[in-house]
Image (cartoon, rainbow, N blue to C red):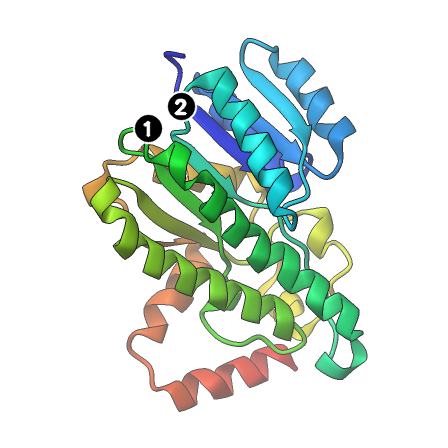
């Protein structure tokens, strides 16, 4: 296939769907994968089967990843970009959230991306200047009140990104992340925690999709490891490098109340 090929998880709605639409508009061949197979199949039909392929994927299942990637690569012969976008969010005090929901969040947000990176490596190595884009969050900058497990999962994504970017440079693969603040999706529609009410929800899925496209198409040497999305996120990210940990911790306490 002459077109560059991108594989997107969580492509049935929100950021994943907006990213798929934008990449397709830019001439990429798009792999659309989600637990909601109906949503991605409908999107593939909208984009045209010469531009997209779709299927069901449970990111917590390694076998699902292996089978789906083999089918995708068999169709395209390349994997230029893997976007680990699938994720969920629960907002509550730590003790008020069941341990099952804590585990589910970690399984999808962290284990899903880890499964994807591990399964995709053989295909990424066969595609020159390929890269992995992990969906992190501004919640990976500081532990967020009432988002404990979500914040922990995104801290872990940040660490995985940093480690793999160093490990896989010998293969010519860049591994980076994007770090948006709250985005106007169903995932945050009913979230009423302090940080949301104080900072607001100003980013659209397309805003994040544009940032992902920029990261995917920039020259590898000039692609940042961590990519905050939106002015508030960029300011928070910059501030963490200059302000003392105690002050940052206090600020997040006030923000979350």
Q: Is residue 94 visible?
A: yes
- Up/down of 50 relative to 251, above or below: above
- Image coordinates of residue 6 in percent, x first then y, are 47, 29
Mark identifier at residue 62: none
Instruction: Give the class, few, some or many, for how many residues have Cα within 10 Å of label 2's Cα (few <14, many ≥20).
Output: many
Q: Secondary structure under badge 2?
A: loop
From the image, which quarter does the C terminus lie in?
Answer: bottom right
State the residue in front, 38 or 92: 38
Name which residue lies at 49% across and 40% down. Answer: 83
Q: Is residue 224 visible?
A: no
Instruction: Give the class, few, some or many, for how many residues have Cα within 10 Å of label 1's Cα (few <14, many ≥20).
Output: some
Name which residue lies at 48% across and 26% down. Answer: 23
From the image, which quarter does the N terminus lie in?
Answer: top left
| Separation (CA) of disc 1 from disc 2 | 6 Å
State the residue in front, 198 or 58: 58
Mark identifier at residue 78: 2
Name which residue lies at 68% across and 34% down. Answer: 12
- Up/down of 140 relative to 34, above or below: below
The residue that mark 1 highlights is 127
Are dots 1 and 2 in contact, CB under 8 Å? yes
- Image coordinates of residue 7 in percent, x first then y, are 51, 32
Total label count?
2
- Image coordinates of residue 252 in percent, x first then y, are 53, 80
N-terminal of the two: label 1 or label 2?
Answer: 2
Q: Secondary structure under badge 1?
A: loop
Name which residue lies at 80% across and 79% down. Answer: 96
- Up/down of 214 relative to 23, above or below: below
């Amino acid at each position: 296939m002459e077109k560059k090929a991108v594989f997107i998880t969580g492509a049935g709605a929100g950021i994943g769907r907006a990213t798929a639409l934008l990449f397709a508009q830019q001439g990429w061949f798009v792999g659309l994968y989600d637990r909601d197979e109906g949503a991605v199949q409908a999107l593939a039909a909208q984009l045209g089967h010469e531009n997209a392929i779709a299927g069901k994927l449970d990111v917590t299942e390694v076998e699902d990843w292996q089978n789906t990637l083999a089918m995708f690569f068999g169709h395209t012969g390349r994997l230029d970009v893997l976007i680990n976008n699938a994720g969920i969010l629960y907002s509550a005090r730590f003790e008020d959230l069941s341990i099952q929901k804590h585990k589910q969040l970690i399984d999808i947000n962290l284990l899903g991306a880890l499964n994807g990176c591990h399964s995709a490596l053989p295909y990424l190595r066969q595609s020159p200047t390929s890269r992995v884009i992990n969906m992190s969050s501004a919640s990976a900058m500081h532990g967020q009140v009432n988002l404990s497990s979500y914040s922990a999962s995104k801290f872990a994504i940040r660490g995985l990104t940093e480690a793999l970017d160093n490990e896989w440079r010998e293969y010519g693969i860049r591994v980076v992340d994007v770090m948006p603040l709250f985005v106007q999706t169903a995932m945050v529609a009913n979230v009423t925690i302090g940080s949301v009410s104080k900072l607001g929800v100003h980013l659209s899925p397309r805003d994040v999709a544009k940032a992902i496209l920029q990261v995917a198409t920039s020259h590898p040497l000039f692609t940042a490891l961590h990519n905050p999305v939106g002015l508030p996120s960029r300011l928070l990210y910059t501030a963490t490098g200059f302000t003392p940990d105690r002050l940052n911790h206090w600020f997040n306490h006030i923000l979350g109340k």
